[in-house]
Image (cartoon, rainbow, N blue to C red):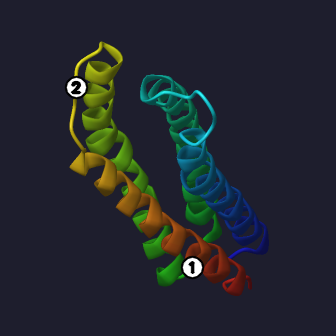
């Protein structure tokens, strides 16, 4: 794989990983522990934060896909890139709309029980936390 493309793919991948770890596994759970943050306030903040995160993730994914496509990647890099992009696409197109409908109801004052969709979203985040470092390391190892 071309050195520049591999370096860009790896660097962007590790930035993406850092954002997922910081937001999904640090900010998201901690905001509900802050004094006087209600579920409604936490959900309102969470929607804004995750909308922004997913937008930035989409841009980062596009940058990785482009760098990998241009760089003539070996099969493992191509597969991991596709997997990371697919995980994000399913989260954004499949899981987020379900979560948004639920949070709409809660923000409107309705009661809503626990959400399996939330657990699915977290599972996808955990999968990205496995795939992204593997992609970054594999891209770096593919430098020719």
86 displayed left or right of 37: left
- Distance between the Cα atoms at labels 2 and 1? 40 Å
- Secondary structure type for disc 2: loop
* Residue 62 in view, yes or no: no
Q: Which residue corresponds to the image point at 56% horizontal and 57% vertical from the top-left?
A: 25
Furthest-front residue in this view: 35
Residue 64 vs 34, above or below: the answer is below
Q: In the image, what residue occupies the spot 76% across and 69% down?
A: 7
CB atoms of marks 2 and 1 within 8 Å:
no
Residue 19 horizontal/vertical position (percent): 65, 52
Q: Is residue 72 left or right of residue 43?
A: right
Disc sitting over residue 111 in the figure:
2
Whole-percent x, y for residue 90 in the image: 32, 50
- Expressed as whole percent of the image width and height from the top left, the position of residue 37 reads 56, 29
Given residues 37 and 104, the one toward you in this image is 37
The quadrant holding residue 103 is top left
The tag on residue 134 is: 1
Disc on the earlier residue, 2 or 1: 2
At label 1, counting other C-alpha atoms closer than 10 Å, the crowd grade (few under 14, some 14-19, many 20 or more) is some
Of the two numbered discs 2 and 1 in the rendering, the one whose residue sits closer to the viewer: 2
Q: In this view, does 8 lie above or below 116?
A: below
Q: Nearer the viewer, residue 14 or 139?
A: 14
């Amino acid at each position: 794989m071309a050195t520049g493309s591999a370096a860009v793919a790896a660097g962007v991948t590790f930035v993406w990983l850092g954002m997922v770890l910081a937001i999904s596994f640090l900010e998201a759970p901690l905001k509900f522990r802050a004094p006087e943050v209600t579920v409604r306030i936490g959900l309102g903040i969470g929607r804004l934060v995750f909308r922004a995160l997913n937008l930035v993730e989409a841009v980062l994914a596009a940058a990785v896909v482009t760098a990998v496509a241009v760089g003539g990647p070996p099969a493992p890099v191509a597969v991991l890139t596709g997997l990371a992009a697919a995980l994000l696409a399913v989260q954004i197109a499949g899981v987020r709309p379900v979560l948004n409908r639920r949070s709409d109801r809660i923000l409107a004052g309705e009661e809503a029980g626990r959400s399996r969709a939330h657990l699915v979203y977290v599972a996808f985040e955990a999968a990205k936390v496995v795939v992204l470092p593997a992609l970054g390391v594999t891209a770096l190892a593919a430098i020719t």
